[in-house]
Amino acid sequence: YTKNYFLSKQTFADYYWQDASGFSATYTDEEGYGLISTYTAYSMTYICMCTGAHKSDAGKILAYNDVKNLLRWASTEYTTLKVLDSSKIFDEVPVRLSKERNYVSVIPESSIYAYLPHDTDVSSAIEQKYELSVKELDAPVKMGDVVGKVTLYYEGEEIASCNLVAKFSVERSGALAFRAALFSPQMIISVVVFAIICAVFGTLRFLALLKILKRGNSE
């Protein structure tokens, strides 16, 4: 037994709808008829709720016809569209310290799908805005390293976002890394500081030796 006449022919066969899959129906004197039903089409499940419905002059509960029309409309007018392909290259980020490559391509972490009107022209209706979190990278770079973010908009509203990642890995060159470290600002500063310390220490020792020599001559 079910209160939802979509699901059974036993009570009122006129309401039976073989494509419906749930849920329930209600009635109160104050609120009238209510109906919650689900419907599956094209691998998508839709749900619709109707409240405050009444009967027609012919005695038909209007909620059943309204819910059926809405569910069919949703399944025919809307569909799931791919709005971003994971293979799309957005940019290239320079890579240092590698002999293999001097850049890495930037792609979405995954494809993105959105539920939109079936006639949506994705190429013109979807706006894509992206921002990189780095200006350059030092090798090694691993495929999938996050380097930014892309946000998608439909009719001015944000509908989805995902990370931008390195498309491929880039190996580090030991020789280039050593040379970079050797001539890095930190290394140059360290060398200069060491040279100053050595100069000061050498000067102090020279002055001390000179003082000793003068004392020996005076004696």
Image (cartoon, grey):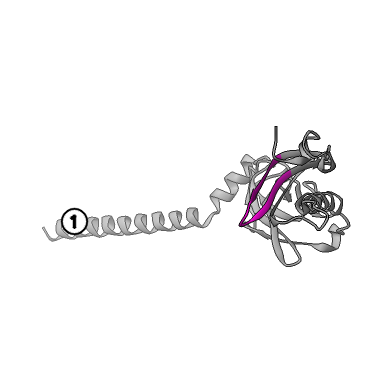
Label 1 sits on a secondary structure element that is helix
Residue bearing the label numbered 1: 212
The percent position of residue 164, horizontal first and vertical second, equals 69, 51
In the visual, does 145 lie left or right of 189?
Answer: right
Question: The N terminus is located in which quarter?
Answer: top right
- The reply to whether the magenta stretch includes residue 30 is yes
In the image, 113 versus 145, the foreground residue is: 113
Magenta residues, as a range?
Answer: 23-37
Q: Can the viewer see residue 88?
A: no
Residue farthest to the bottom, as pictured: 156
Q: Magenta stretch mostly in which secondary structure?
A: strand
Residue farthest to the front, as pictured: 58
How packed mark 1 is, by other alpha carbons closer than 10 Å (few <14, some 14-19, many 20 or more), is: few
Callout 1 amino acid: Ile
Residue in view at x 65 percent, y 43 percent: 141
Q: Quadrant of residue 199?
A: bottom left
The percent position of residue 181, horizontal first and vertical second, equals 55, 49
Q: Can the viewer see residue 124?
A: yes
Q: Quadrant of residue 193?
A: bottom left
- The reply to whether the magenta stretch includes residue 129 is no
In the image, 99 versus 150, the foreground residue is: 150
**Count of picture labels:** 1
Residue in view at x 25 percent, y 60 percent: 207
The percent position of residue 61, horizontal first and vertical second, equals 77, 51
Relative height, residue 117 to residue 18 (above, below): below
In the image, 71 versus 132, the foreground residue is: 71
The percent position of residue 219, horizontal first and vertical second, equals 10, 57
Residue in view at x 62 percent, y 40 percent: 174
Residue farthest to the left, as pictured: 219
In the visual, does 193 lie left or right of 126?
Answer: left
